[in-house]
Image: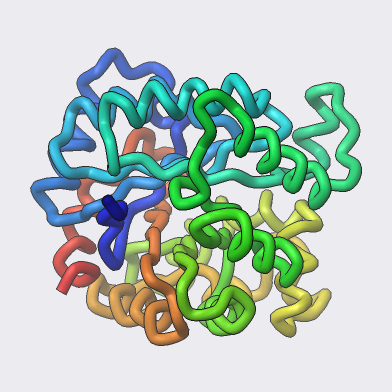
Amino acid sequence: MPLELGRVGFWVSSRLFLDDEGGEVARVAGELEELGIPALWLGGANPDLELVSHLLQASHRLVVATGIVSIWAARAAALAADVARVTSRHPDRFLLGLGVSHAPGVERSGQRYVHPYQKMVTYLDELDVASPPVPKERRVLAALGPRMLRLAAERAAGAHPYLVTPEHTRRAREILGPEPLLAPEHMAVVETDPGRAREIGRATLARYLQLPNYTNNLRRLGFTEDDLAGAGSDSLVDALIAWGTPDEIGARIREHREAGADHVTVQVLTSPDVTGPPHEQWRLLAPALTR
């Protein structure tokens, strides 16, 4: 059966569940189903598939996806075995997102970040021959550039681009063709004051502007060195982070679907001093995203 991702989902860092003893997992799973949000994407370079299993166990219909598992952080055979355990318990409710991550983090782990595209090709080959394998239709790639997007169309169900604009979605759809899944991530701040909204957005955006995979993609989209300097220009922040009322944010998210996205996963940003999943903002946004 196909996965029922729906048109929208929420994206949240798996780190928010690190100290949880089960209560937050159950609350998130139940709340998203109550709000009519069909999918939750777990961010981080190596989301714990045991956490995925707990979220699925605590819900009835929720689809959980990883956004993403770094191919440098988990051996393909071991990951395939973990995926098989999750999917045997919860068929048609888990989607494996894979990515090549970024050089600084990989090299801090003691590995050399060389030939990331070929590393992904080899990793997919290993998933294909694992026992049991991870089926093509149950994996997506964190693809930004044309080459990785074409690989996502050929070797996976589709692509999960992160930190992108609707213009990137339009270009990605042209490269992928009409059939593969296109599920971009987009950040959002439920705040109508421009200065405050951008301040919250920059607190997250600044670290991504230190990573060449993202900045190279943003240059391809026409952003300049001035846009990319520091924590980003106002134009860059406004392009990458939807802010305003729930209806205004909903309209921005629909731009991705109009550009060719099948599903958009929304990462809600809050003040850095707020810990835990953004329950209040999810409740405010859900009606505007699902109608």
Q: Is residue 233 left or right of residue 57?
A: right
Q: What is the x, y in percent for residue 264?
A: 39, 65
Residue 137 against residue 64 in the figure, above or below: below
Residue drawn at x 54%, y 83% is 170
Q: Nearer the viewer, residue 151 or 132?
A: 132
User: Residue at image x 48%, y 65%?
Assistant: 184
Front in this rendered view, residue 78 or 130: 130
Does the image show residue 178? yes
State the quadrant of the C terminus.
bottom left
Please, which colouring scheme is shown? rainbow
Position of 136 relative to 251 (above/below): above
Q: In the rendered view, does 31 fall on the left or right side of 212?
A: left
Image coordinates of residue 128 in percent, x first then y, are 61, 38
Give whichever of 232, 174 is nearer the camera: 174
Dividing the picture into quadrants, the one containing residue 276 is top left
The mark total stands at 0
Residue 13 position within the rendered picture, expressed as x and y whole percent measured from the top left: 46, 39
Which residue sits at x=47%, y=30%? Answer: 15
Q: Quadrant of residue 14?
A: top left
Position in image of residue 261 (x %, y %): 43, 74
Give the residue at x 73% y 45%.
120
